[in-house]
Image (cartoon, helix red, strand yellow):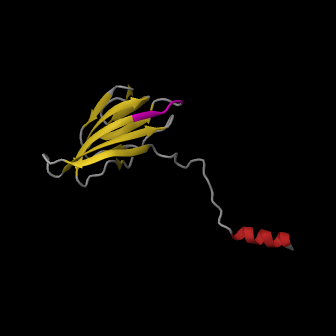
């Protein structure tokens, strides 16, 4: 009888399922500073870091603002629409014009982490990252 009661109680508990196709955790983004620009009304500057685990990638996205990226450690493969994919190593950098569609942004290594320093200039209410639908 105790076994039947235990089975009945356990059957009432919610079951959490995990699926193999669930998305991996996203890259870690940390805002270091954010300031309104006194000489450019309505615009702000933002400095942030992006940490990628080995093999990790960002979703395809665009930035409303202008972005400049500098690889602090590891290697990052980046591709903006209309350009070929390029792998940047620590100490290298690139520029993305406002509105650019960033199709690829990923850690180039499957075994080592990677880290970017990003400086952006954008409108006061603009989003840092807007996912692309396709």
Image spot of residue 87 (x, y percent): 39, 27
Magenta residues, start to end:
111-115
Image spot of residue 90 (x, y percent): 39, 26
- Farthest-out residue, right: 1
Image spot of residue 66 (x, y percent): 24, 41
Image spot of residue 28 (x, y percent): 44, 44
Q: Nearer the viewer, residue 118 or 22?
A: 118
Report the side of 109 relative to 84 (left or right).
Answer: right
Relative to residue 34, is residue 8 depicted above or below?
below
Quadrant hosting residue 14: bottom right
Quadrant hosting residue 96: top left
Which residue is at a point 54% across and 30% down the rendered structure image?
Answer: 111
Q: Nearer the viewer, residue 82 or 38?
A: 38
- Label count reads 0
Which residue is at a point 14% across and 51% down the rendered structure image?
Answer: 41
Q: Main secondary structure of the magenta part?
A: loop
Report the side of 101 relative to 22 (left or right).
Answer: left
Which residue is at a point 49% across and 29% down the rendered structure image?
Answer: 109
Quadrant hosting residue 88: top left
Report the side of 15 relative to 95 (left or right).
Answer: right
Relative to residue 59, is residue 108 depicted above or below?
above
Which residue is at a point 14% across and 47% down the rendered structure image?
Answer: 40
**Magenta stretch: includes residue 117:** no
Picture quarter with the N terminus: bottom right
Relative to residue 11, is residue 104 depicted above or below?
above
């Amino acid at each position: 009888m105790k076994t039947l009661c235990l089975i009945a109680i356990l059957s009432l508990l919610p079951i959490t399922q995990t699926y193999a196709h669930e998305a991996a955790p996203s890259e870690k983004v940390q805002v270091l500073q954010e300031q309104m620009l006194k000489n450019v009304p309505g615009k702000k500057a933002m400095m942030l870091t992006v940490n990628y685990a080995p093999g990790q990638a960002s979703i395809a996205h665009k930035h409303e603002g202008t972005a400049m990226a500098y690889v602090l450690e590891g290697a990052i493969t980046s591709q903006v629409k209309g350009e070929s994919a390029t792998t940047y190593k620590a100490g290298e950098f690139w520029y993305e014009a406002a509105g650019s569609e960033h199709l690829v942004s990923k850690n180039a290594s499957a075994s080592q982490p990677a880290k970017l320093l990003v400086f952006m200039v954008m409108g006061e209410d603009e989003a840092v990252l807007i996912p692309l639908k396709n």
